[in-house]
Image: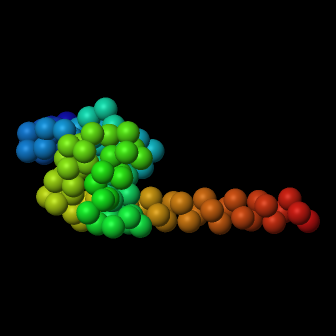
Amino acid sequence: MSSLATRFIEEGLRMDAHPAICFRDGPAGRRAILVGGPEVADVVSAIIGGDVPVEKRRSRVAELMCLHESLVDAAMAYYADHTSEIDNEIAAQEEAAERHQALWERQQTLLTQ
């Protein structure tokens, strides 16, 4: 019970500091998300890994993700305060994507035998 209370207090403090952020459980665990929107890690990975010039990334990510630019700013503000957490989530997403790609490729190879 105390670990649950600790989690709620920590998340409450984070949501107080970042009003556009809330938390949701999912297959990969509990994640920071934009209220009514995608995971913060998804927004951050789109903006830091973009192939668009830096000055246009914010508006491009907002357009592609159907978000108001203020929500992109909120994701980046949360990222600035919790960089290692979001970096770890992005790395885990990339590893999962690589595993799924390798599995799909093995399946395709089996189909052609």
The answer to whether residue 73 is visible is yes
Q: Judge by depth and name the residue closer to the eye, 81 or 9.
A: 81
**Left or right: 107 in relation to 27:** right
Q: Position of residue 26 (x, y in %)?
A: 41, 41
Residue at 29% across / 66% down in the picture?
Answer: 54
Q: Identify the image quadrant of residue 89.
A: bottom left
Q: How is the image coloured?
A: rainbow
**Left or right: 87 in relation to 81:** right
Q: Is residue 59 above or below residue 49?
A: above
**Left or right: 87 in relation to 104:** left
Q: Is residue 38 above or below residue 99?
A: above
**Left or right: 92 in relation to 73:** right
Q: Quadrant of the C terminus?
A: bottom right
Q: Position of residue 36 (x, y in %)?
A: 31, 32
Residue at 28% across / 54% down in the picture?
Answer: 58
Q: Judge by depth and name the residue closer to the eye, 26 or 104.
A: 104
Q: Position of residue 110 (x, y in %)?
A: 84, 63
Q: Position of residue 97 (x, y in %)?
A: 54, 60
Residue at 27% across / 39% down in the picture?
Answer: 68
The answer to whether residue 2 is visible is no
Residue at 89% across / 63% down in the picture?
Answer: 112
